Image (cartoon, rainbow, N blue to C red):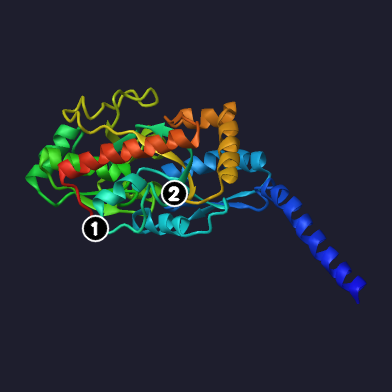
Amino acid sequence: MQKSFRRVEFQRVYFYAALCVCTPAMAQQYPAQPIRAVVGYAAGGGADGMIRAISNELSEALGQPVIIDNRPGGGTMIATQLVANSKPDGYTMYVADPALIFNPYLLPKVPYDALRDFAPVVAVTVSSSSMLVVHPSFPAKSVKELVAMARAQPGKLNYASGGNSTLPHILTEMMNYEAKINLAHVPYKSTGLAIYAATAGEVPIAAGGLFAVKGLADTGKLRPLAIASAKRSPMMPQVPTFAESGWPMIDGASYRGLLLPAATPRDAILKLNAATNKVLQIAAVRKRFTDTDGDVLGGTPEEYGKIIRAELDKWGKVIRNSGIKVE
């Protein structure tokens, strides 16, 4: 009886000893399953295009598939809340764009805190290529002419964007405020859908990124009026900046990056950060971004955290001062 008891005790001790030995090894195995990249828009547009530009190489670097999960709606808050509330195990990440920054200042109630509920992983790209475009049949051929038309028929002209809280939406609302006009916003589920709507004549005006606009503008299916950047894009040098058009305050950088839920283990954050930085050094990947007017960033989780804090401070002041609201 005593021998049997000792045998049981020995087996129990051996089990726990083995568990203690295995636990660190198990932690080092991240990632051990596919990683879901949640995008707050339908396919097409900046955030979706960004993750698709790196997903194959990131899958290879991590040794696990990176599965893109498009969850449009709610000004990206459906996707944002999904990730904020998901298990902090490193397997559900958020593909962040300026909506993460804008929503807290635009909406009366936001179910997340950009600093408290997320762990920054890495800033991937930055671009300043939001553009205002019109259907070829639209009479205005410049921002000045558009403003004159809008003043003559307040509330009668519609513009499309990839959704509430996107950078093109905010910049166009800044133009509304500064020019004292009332272009009516028609939000779509992605920039691609918004640009298509303008191409099809569903709306006369659209705001979107250069990536979504260039091909259609090159073939004459859209007419660009201005780009919201400090200088003209070398990809479309014929398009003036808003500053050249008389509205220097309409200028904005668009940061995109990867976030994980708060309380995600540091090991998972660092492994995902290292894999992404490795991918961003691949020449073919960098070319995908530079070809669409995006600058590759990379860096540490802490550097991305500083960007998020700075953007919250910057755009909070802009939105409060301009009085922009989302109904």
The residue at the far bottom in this view is: 1
Is residue 264 in sight in this rendering? Answer: yes
Number of the front mark, 2 or 1? 2
In the displayed structure image, the side of residue 177 where residue 75 appears, left or right:
right
The image position of residue 245, as x and y in percent, is: 19, 28
Q: Along the line of sight, which residue is nearer the eye, 88 or 22?
A: 22
| CB within 8 Å, label 2 to label 1 | no
Q: Which residue is mark 2?
A: 118
Q: Quadrant of residue 129?
A: top left
Q: Which residue is mark 1?
A: 108
Secondary structure found at label 2:
strand
Q: Which residue occupies 37% across, 48% down?
A: 114
User: In this picture, is 189 found above or below 319?
Assistant: below
Hey, what amino acid is under mark 2? Phe
Q: Quadrant of residue 13?
A: bottom right
Binning the other alpha carbons within 10 Å of mark 1 as few (below 14), some (14 to 19) or many (20 upward) gives few
Q: How many marks?
A: 2
In the displayed structure image, the side of residue 180 where residue 106 appears, left or right:
right
The image position of residue 50, as x and y in percent, is: 48, 40
- Which quadrant is the N terminus positioned in? bottom right
Q: How far apart are labels 2 and 1 at the CA level?
A: 20 Å
Q: Along the line of sight, which residue is nearer the eye, 21 or 229?
A: 21
Q: Along the line of sight, which residue is nearer the eye, 172 or 239?
A: 172
User: In this picture, is 36 found above or below 149?
Assistant: below
The image position of residue 236, as x and y in percent, is: 36, 26
In the displayed structure image, the side of residue 227 where residue 94 appears, left or right:
right
In the displayed structure image, the side of residue 239 where residue 278 appears, left or right:
right
The image position of residue 217, as x and y in percent, is: 36, 35
Hey, what amino acid is under mark 1? Pro
Q: Along the line of sight, which residue is nearer the eye, 175 or 300?
A: 300
